[in-house]
Image (tube, grey):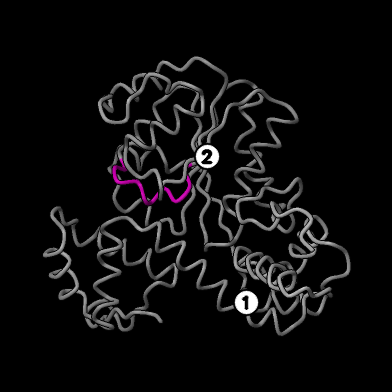
Amino acid sequence: MITDARVLQPEFIPSEVKHRDAEVNTLSSVLRPLTDGVRADPAFLYGPSGTGKTCIAQFTVERLRQEVVDVNYQYVNCWEDYSRFKTLYTILDGINNTIDIHRQSTPKDVLLDRLKDYTGPPYVVILDEVDQLQDKSLLYDLYRVKDLTMLLIANKETEVFAEIDDRLTSRLTTATRIHFDHYSRSELTTILNDRVQWGLVPNIIDQERLNLIAAKAAGDARIAIGILRNAARHAHGNSLDEIPTDVIRDVVPETKSEIQQQTIDRLTDHQQTLYDIITDHGTIEPQALYDEYQERVTDPKTKRTVRNHLSKLEHYNLIGSEGNTKGRIYRALT
């Protein structure tokens, strides 16, 4: 039933993208200086999860490399590589410059100095989930690296710029902002049609059922593709020759739970602690939450940073909140 499992994975980058022409054209314009062998200004891609930010960033850079220009590029997931050392290591690894770097003993300054000495073609670094960086000053250091172009990706602009100093703010004010909205139901159906064509045997799902998947995904392509993937697996496992409606409905909770667990698994220690406290209490007000958070960790962050963490947890539907700033209550979501 599944002829190419790759196209049903969230990290798959298609050879063509749908319903993001404006965003691709804007980012292509930003990157145009690379065709002259010089770095481009930073760009900032932001919007809800599942709206194609990561896909469009990688697609646009890959297309530029294939069509016209010699460019190196590296993708960094800052939720996984959130420390200064890990981020610099991954960036250097993209230009094969980590062979003698030891994760336990090499000083962080050595990594940055080595990156500053880079003399290859223009280098594009995609920093996904950039708000997860522990040390935002790294962005300032990367901005100063000759021939390095940064593409920053996050859910909200405020989550990135709330904790950076004036030096970096003044330099990133010129960064092109590219906003991504949720997909419409018809747009998601088109995306699903492509994935069916590329990855499944013909005639196993009709348009009505693809529309149902799109409706259940509520504008999130990651959820839509996940539902399609799990429905195909269930249908195959039960020796069915098509994907029926009841299977689609059955896998929706499973898919959303699967994606939620993947998000929980990626939480930083501080985010995990906040999530655990809220889950333990069911509901809790901000001051009580912060007080218990301070008791559970050895290096508590500021209230401002904690608020940003909580905003991140809310964005990914791990927690909810009610009320205004003074009367706010955080609650666990089951």
Relative to 36, residue 169 above or below:
below
* Residue in the image at 67% along x and 36% along y: 62
Please state which amino acid type lies under the numbered disc 2: Tyr
Relative to 296, residue 22 above or below:
above
Residue of label 2: 75
Q: Position of residue 37 (x, y in %)?
A: 61, 20
Residue 273 is left or right of residue 17, and the answer is: left
- Give the residues drawn in magenta, as a range: 127-136
Relative to 319, residue 153 above or below:
above
1 and 325: which is toward the camera: 1
139 and 280: which is toward the camera: 280
Q: Quadrant of residue 203?
A: bottom right
Q: Position of residue 304 (x, y in %)?
A: 23, 60
Residue 192 is left or right of residue 41, and the answer is: right
Residue 18 is left or right of residue 241, and the answer is: left
* Residue in the image at 37% along x and 56% along y: 159
Indicate whether residue 134 is drawn in magenta.
Answer: yes
Please state which amino acid type lies under the numbered disc 1: Val
Residue of label 1: 251
Q: Residues within 10 Å of mark 2 (few under 14, many from 20)?
A: some
Q: Residues within 10 Å of mark 1 (few under 14, many from 20)?
A: many
Helix, strand or loop at mark 1: helix
Q: Position of residue 324 (x, y in %)?
A: 29, 80
Q: First in sequence, mark 1 or 2: give its number.
A: 2
Q: Nearer the viewer, mark 1 or mark 2?
A: 1
- Which quadrant is the C terminus positioned in? bottom left
Helix, strand or loop at mark 2: strand
Q: Position of residue 313 (x, y in %)?
A: 37, 67
